[in-house]
């Protein structure tokens, strides 16, 4: 079993991150497997070195150990190579739509925001501007995919087979972005899926808020010949009002708990995890 914790260095870690990291670490330890840390720093407008340093310090305080982290910004050529392969299959198109224009279409919302209505699907890659977003053409991708795809979900307590079709994804998400507009940063779906395969991750443990995006990842895995890991989408840690924790809420940052003398045992108890012998 190889698990991973893959934070974005855009702010401090909070209790929800602690739960996710410790859960992935505990599962790997129980199976005598490996635990990896991956710094997902491809958002060039928001990621900061000081946040990365704080993340590493927090994870060490939580008692996790790991080999040298993979930093996504060091592997931009790898993501471009994946884009090139998808382009060779004719599965990408450029898009200059902004969020406001997509909202005005009234197409509804999906896990990535406004459901993409196919506005730029007619455009050819030869007409792409340097600052265009690049999207995966799901309509064309259907020719390369089975009628139905599935993955194993274990976050419900027992393994479940989750089935979906590409048509489902077109309806609920639309053609996902693989390279961001203006910055040309590789998008989360591409970089995350590439690295799970490249690092040999066997079990993806992450919050249930990411579960709706999993079909996109499976589609990319099938198109690129990457293996599909087992997924464990866990519960989210909420505040007292039932609101999901966010990085913007610095009052619940792990560094603040640490400064106040909170122990690892306290953190494990707060997020509902067993107290380890070393805590």
Image (spheres, rainbow, N blue to C red):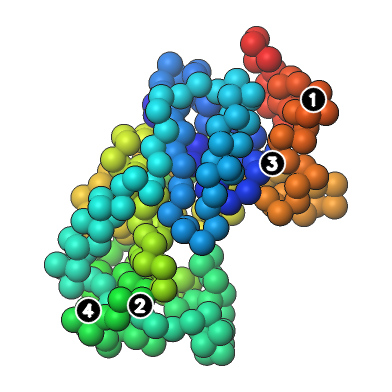
> How many residues crowd around disc 2 within 10 Å: few (fewer than 14), some, or many (20 or more)?
some
N-terminal-most mark, 3 or 2: 3
In the rendered image, the vertical position of residue 130 relative to residue 73, given as above or below: below
Cα distance between the residues tagged 3 and 2? 34 Å
N-terminal-most mark, 4 or 3: 3
Q: Is residue 199 visible?
A: yes
Q: Which mark is residue 262?
A: 1
Estimate the x, y position of residue 14 in percent, counting from the top left. 69, 41
- State the residue position of label 3: 14
Cα distance between the residues tagged 4 and 2? 10 Å
Estimate the x, y position of residue 274 in percent, counting from the top left. 68, 21
Q: Are marks 4 and 2 in contact (CB under 8 Å)?
A: no
Nearest-to-viewer mark from 4 and 2: 2
- Badge 4 marks a residue whose secondary structure is helix
Cα distance between the residues tagged 1 and 4? 54 Å
> How many residues crowd around disc 3 within 10 Å: few (fewer than 14), some, or many (20 or more)?
many
N-terminal-most mark, 3 or 1: 3
- State the residue position of label 2: 132
Cα distance between the residues tagged 4 and 3? 41 Å
Residue drawn at x 18%, y 81% as measured from the top left: 126
- State the residue position of label 4: 125
């Amino acid at each position: 079993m190889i698990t991973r914790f893959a934070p974005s260095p855009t702010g401090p870690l909070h209790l929800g991150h602690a739960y996710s990291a410790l859960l992935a670490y505990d599962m790997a330890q129980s199976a005598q497997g490996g635990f990896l840390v991956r710094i997902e720093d491809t958002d060039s407008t928001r990621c900061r070195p000081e946040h990365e340093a704080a993340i590493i310090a927090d994870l060490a305080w939580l008692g996790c150990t790991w080999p040298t982290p993979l930093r996504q910004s060091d592997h931009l050529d790898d993501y471009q190579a994946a884009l090139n392969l998808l382009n060779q299959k004719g599965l990408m198109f450029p898009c200059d739509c902004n969020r406001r224009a997509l909202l005005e279409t009234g197409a509804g919302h999906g896990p990535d925001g406004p459901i993409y209505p196919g506005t730029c699907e007619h455009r050819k890659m030869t007409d792409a501007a340097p600052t265009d977003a690049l999207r995966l053409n799901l309509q064309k991708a259907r020719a390369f995919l089975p009628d139905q795809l599935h993955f194993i979900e274990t976050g419900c307590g027992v393994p479940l087979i989750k089935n979906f079709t590409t048509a489902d994804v077109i309806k609920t998400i639309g053609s996902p972005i693989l390279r961001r507009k203006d910055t040309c940063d590789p998008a989360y779906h591409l970089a995350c899926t590439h690295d799970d395969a490249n690092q040999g991750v066997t079990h993806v443990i992450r919050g249930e808020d990411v579960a709706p995006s999993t079909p996109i990842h499976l589609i990319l895995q099938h198109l690129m010949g990457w293996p599909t890991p087992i997924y464990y989408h866990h519960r989210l840690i909420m505040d007292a009002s039932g609101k999901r924790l966010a990085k913007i809420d610095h009052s619940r940052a792990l560094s603040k708990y640490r400064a106040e003398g909170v122990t690892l045992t306290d953190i494990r108890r707060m997020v509902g995890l067993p107290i380890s012998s070393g805590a």
